[in-house]
Image (cartoon, rainbow, N blue to C red):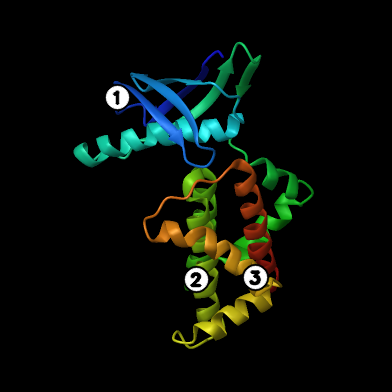
C-alpha cells in the first residue's frame, strides 16, 4: 500500500525549526502497526506513514499530529519554546486520497448549522460580564482546546463542565463544600441526567491522572455532542 503523506506547518513560523525523525509505532486503540517518517524544514512539515491497512484519515491525522506534537514538546521542554503543529493536507496515491483538512469539527458544525449566529453570540456575551463571566470564558476556551487536542478531548470537555459548576456556585450562592448540591443545580439548569455527566467524567478521569486514553473520531463525536448539549442547556437556563 502507498504511504499516507501528511503536510502541515509548525507555528509560529518566525521561530524556525528543522527536524528529522523516523519511528515505528502501534496504535493503541486498533493495535495497528505502522511506521512514520517526519521531516520539518523551516517549519514546513511532511510526514509519511506506512501501514498495511487502510485508515480513517481523521484518526490517522490525529496520530500524525500527536507524533509531531510529542517531539515538539521535547524541544519546548529543552528550549522553552511553545510550538504548535497544524496538519493541513493528506494524500495517498493508491487510495486516491487528496484531502485538505478544515478547522471544523463536523459533528458540531452539523449540530449547530441552524442557529442564528448573530443572535446567539449577543445572548452569550450578555452572560459573560463580571467575575461570573470568567468561568464561562474558561468553559469556552476548554471546549476549543478539546477540539484541537484529540487525545485529551475528554479532559477538556469535562473541565469545561467543571467551570459551569464553579459559575453555578458563584451565581446561585451555593456552599463551595456542598458538591452534591452544586452538581444537582448544574443538572437542573442543563436539563441533563447524572449518567450523562458521569459518562463525560469517565472519559476525563484517566487523563486527569496522567494515563493514556486513545479515542477514535467516532468516540470524539459522541463526547462532543453530549458536552455541547450540557453546555447549551446550562447557558439557556442559567
- In the picture, measured across the screen, residue 185 lies left or right of residue 155, that is right
Between tags 3 and 1, which lies in front? Answer: 3
Check disc 1 and report its element: helix, strand or loop.
loop
- In the picture, measured across the screen, residue 63 lies left or right of residue 110, that is left
Q: Where is residue 154 in the image (x, y as percent from the top left)?
A: 52, 55
**Does residue 238 show up?**
no
Find disc 3 in the rendering and name its residue: 195
Checking the image for residue 224, the label placed there is none
Q: Residue at x 56, y 35 (%)?
A: 59
Find disc 2 in the rendering and name its residue: 130
Query: Badges 2 and 3: C-beta atoms under 8 Å apart?
Result: no
Mark 3 and mark 1: Cα distance apart in space: 47 Å
Mark 2 and mark 3: Cα distance apart in space: 32 Å
Between tags 2 and 3, which lies in front? Answer: 3
**Does residue 222 show up?**
yes
Q: How crowded is mark 3: few (under 14 residues within 10 Å), some or many (20 or more)?
A: few
Q: Quadrant of residue 78?
A: top left
Given the current orientation, which residue lies at the most extreme left position? 78
Q: Residue at x 55, y 81 (%)?
A: 182
Q: Position of residue 60 (x, y in %)?
A: 53, 31
Find disc 1 in the rendering and name its residue: 16
Q: Where is residue 63 in the image (x, y as percent from the top left)?
A: 48, 34
Q: Which of marks 2 and 1 is nearer the N terminus?
A: 1
Q: Which residue is drawn at 55% across and 77% down?
A: 168
Amino acid at each position: 500500500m502507498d504511504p499516507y503523506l501528511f503536510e502541515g506547518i509548525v507555528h509560529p513560523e518566525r521561530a524556525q525549526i528543522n527536524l528529522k525523525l523516523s519511528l515505528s509505532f502501534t496504535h493503541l486503540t486498533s493495535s495497528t502497526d505502522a511506521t512514520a517518517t517526519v521531516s520539518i524544514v523551516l517549519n514546513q512539515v511532511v510526514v509519511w506513514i506506512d501501514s498495511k491497512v487502510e485508515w480513517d484519515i481523521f484518526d490517522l491525522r490525529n496520530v500524525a499530529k500527536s507524533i509531531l506534537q510529542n517531539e515538539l514538546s521535547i524541544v519546548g521542554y529543552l528550549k522553552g519554546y511553545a510550538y504548535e503543529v497544524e496538519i493541513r493536507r493528506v494524500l495517498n496515491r493508491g487510495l486516491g486520497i487528496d484531502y485538505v483538512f478544515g478547522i471544523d469539527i463536523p459533528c458540531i458544525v452539523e449540530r449547530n448549522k441552524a442557529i442564528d449566529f448573530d443572535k446567539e453570540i449577543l445572548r452569550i456575551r450578555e452572560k459573560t460580564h463580571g467575575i461570573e463571566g470568567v468561568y464561562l470564558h474558561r468553559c469556552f476556551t476548554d471546549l476549543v482546546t478539546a477540539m484541537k487536542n484529540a487525545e485529551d478531548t475528554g479532559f477538556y470537555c469535562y473541565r469545561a463542565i467543571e467551570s459551569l459548576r464553579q459559575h453555578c456556585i458563584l451565581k446561585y450562592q451555593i456552599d463551595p463544600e456542598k458538591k452534591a448540591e452544586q452538581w444537582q443545580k448544574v443538572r437542573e439548569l442543563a436539563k441533563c441526567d447524572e449518567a450523562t455527566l458521569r459518562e463525560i467524567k469517565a472519559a476525563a478521569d484517566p487523563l486527569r491522572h496522567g494515563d493514556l486514553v486513545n479515542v477514535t473520531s467516532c468516540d470524539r463525536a459522541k463526547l462532543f455532542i453530549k458536552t455541547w448539549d450540557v453546555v447549551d442547556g446550562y447557558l439557556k437556563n442559567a
